[in-house]
Amino acid sequence: MINVLIVDDDPMVAEFNKRYLKEINGFFLVGVAHSVNEATKIINNQKVDLVLLDIYMPGENGLTLLSKIRKEKIELDVILITAASDVDKIQTALRYGAVDYLIKPFEFERFHQALISYKEKFFILSQQSKMKQKDLDELFLVKQDELTATEPLKPLPKGLSKKTLTIVFNAIKGQGNHPFTTDEIAEITDISRVSIRKYLKFLNEIHVIDETLTYGIGRPLYSYMFNEENESILVQYE
């Protein structure tokens, strides 16, 4: 198992990242810290392999923690998950050895991609003492579109029907390039929100729609966007 520490001053965001992490096999959450000081204590007292790190926090920011980790030569990796989108912070994080950088808000698929890619590298590198250039190239140069192109057809989940899938998809397609919510599709189709969520989850998993989690006042909001490039995938479910 890969031991993970989540560092984010927003309890709600930290909770969502925690839930996301639970959906991916191979990772174990060792703790959640809401400041650099809390994170430092956990890192000094527990085995941590990977830190999911925010930049904007009260007091010392995430880049300060990343700098300390590198200066003290602590053997762990860092993925930035932050609203910081300015190039200087991105460059600083990469120069300090961040293995990935996710800008909030992001889709679960991007989070999943970052963790799966990290897990693959982590286990391969931890089991080898030497590697050939060919093996390194396969590990670091593989394209994500090549990975998704070889994915087997995901079966229609139990409880979902092809007929209703078509109804839901037609409602989604009618939204064009505009984002939409579960409630909007439920109203258009006259299908319950619970059922619509199941269909949207499936369509997101097969990349026909893209999911975005928006943080604002109150509870985070999921919105979706039709991915026209992958519409042909649905032909396999007719």
Image: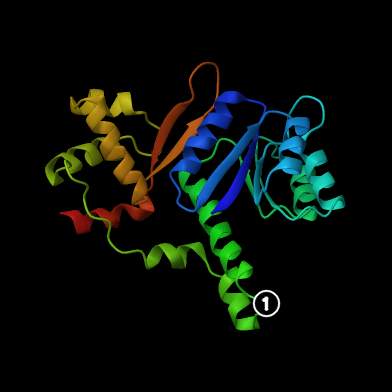
Position above or below: 86 against 8:
below
Label 1 element class: loop
Q: Is residue 53 left or right of residue 212?
A: right
- At 37% from the left and 50% from the top, the residue drawn is 207
Residue farthest top in this picture: 218
Amino acid type at circle 1 is Ser
The residue pinned by badge 1 equals: 129
Quadrant in the rendering for residue 42: top right
Residue 177, placed above or below residue 208: above
Q: Quadrant of the C terminus?
A: bottom left
Residue 209, by quadrant, is: top left
Can residue 178 be seen here? Answer: no
Q: Nearer the viewer, residue 44 or 128?
A: 44
Q: Residue at x 61, y 36 (%)?
A: 31
**In the displayed structure image, the side of residue 37 where residue 137 appears, left or right:** left
Q: Hey, which residue is sitting farthest right in the picture? A: 71
Q: Is residue 143 above or below residue 224?
A: below
Indicate how the structure is coloured in the image: rainbow
Q: Position of residue 115 (x, y in %)?
A: 54, 52
Where 180 falls versus 126 (above or below)?
above
Residue 200 placement: quadrant: top left
- Pinpoint residue 202: horizontal percent, then vertical percent: 30, 44
Considering depth in this image, is 188 or 215 the residue closer to the camera? Answer: 215
Please report the residue visible at 15 percent of the width from the left and 39 percent of the height from the top. Answer: 164
Where residue 181 sits in the image (x, y, percent)? Answer: 36, 28
- Whether residue 189 is visible to the viewer of this picture, yes or no, is yes
Q: Residue furthest front?
A: 45
Image location of residue 26, percent across then percent down = 49, 53
Report the side of 10 relative to 109 (left or right): right
Identify which residue is drawn at 87% across, 51% down.
71
Crowding at mark 1 (Cα within 10 Å: few <14, some 14-19, many 20+): few
- Circle count: 1
